[in-house]
Image: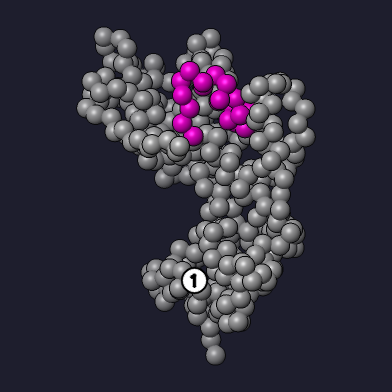
Amino acid sequence: MPSMLCCGKCFNDRGLERQIIPVASTVTRDCPTCGSENRQCVEAIDLNDYFELLCGIYVPDDDGKLLVDWLIEDWGLFSISRDKANLLLVEILDDGNRVREPVTPSERCKSQRLNSWEELRTELRYRNRFFPETNFELERLAELLDHLMVPIEDQDLDWFRARIQKSPAPYSGAQMGAPPKRLASHGRANPAGIPYLYLGSKTETAVAEVRPHPGETVCVASFQLKKGIEVVDLRNPRQSVSPFSLIVDEDDVALMRGDIEFLERLGNELTTPVLPNAAAIDYIPSQYICEFIKKCQYSGVLYSSSIGDGKNLALFDPALATVGKKVEVYSVRSVDVSIERWAE
């Protein structure tokens, strides 16, 4: 009896959607599981070998959670509802009992990399900046970055940069690029004296990132990126990393599961708001990350905005983006404020 049909859109996983399912598919139709139209579909059981290796990193534990909940929490694996995901998992594993048993990640999933990073970031800020002594595995970090690489395609070429207008006249396009080296102060991604080009995916994102006050005037220029450059995406590692691209053995998957929290911490380094008077020190860990990403031959890093929606890009070589001919001028009407009482 045929099992459920599913397609790549049933999952939030690049490996399944772009590689595994297109190769295994023998039919194109509307997906009966997620409702996506005109998709390459496979029978759920055809994904069994891949899921067996992934699910093998979880072991029985009466105090644990159901397998579907771990797959959602650890990997953000499904784009369908939890109930549908559980039914699909039954079909994939061909085992209804297995999805009803509580499990927990095995000992192989434990990683000390997050602890090592916390030690390193403290050392970089307060003890040794250029020759740190903390034992931190840069080779492993380079491997992890490869799983977060995304190429800049046609739909991602247009970006924006904002500057608060300090002069009587609006800035020209030539004045909207990265600052000269001698004037480049420390930023979230760049050390002082090494200018990067900071861009936002939307006008509103770019304006929010310069933190204007109501009544100020902001100039915004559009930039077009060079197609095909490769950047590291630190916005959501749980969805960016595909455990199915690691299918060599269960140990590789377990190791990545242990490193996901570490990757999320790296993304937070670029997103967490920093007070201006503390920026010179608190930006050092994120600058260290970005300098290493640059050393690994990537062109920039994508990160979430800490004060608005959309996404940001720190471009290491400003020459990889071309400024548009027109600079738009905006007046800031209001700035939203959100507060939270400190815990006693």
Which residue is at the front of the view, 88 or 201? Answer: 88
Question: On the image, numbered disc 1 is attached to which residue?
Answer: 85
In this rendering, is residue 261 above or below 206? below
Residue 169 at x, y = what percent? 26, 11
The amino acid at mark 1 is Ala
In this rendering, is residue 49 above or below 175? below
Q: Which residues are magenta?
A: 272-290
Q: Quadrant of residue 221?
A: top left
Quarter occupied by the C terminus: top left
Q: Is residue 280 magenta?
A: yes
Q: Is residue 199 magenta?
A: no
Residue 234 at x, y = what percent? 54, 42
Q: Quadrant of residue 312?
A: top left
Please name the residue shown 33% across and 36% down the image. Answer: 338
The local secondary structure at tag 1 comes to helix
Residue 93 at x, y = what percent? 61, 77
Which residue is at the front of the view, 324 or 294? Answer: 294
In this rendering, is residue 154 above or below 171? below
Side of 205 where 251 appears, left or right: right
Please name the residue shown 64% across and 71% down the image. Answer: 62
Please name the residue shown 62% across and 32% down the image. Answer: 289
Side of 260 where 87 appears, left or right: left
Quarter occupied by the N terminus: bottom right
Q: How is the image coloured?
A: one colour
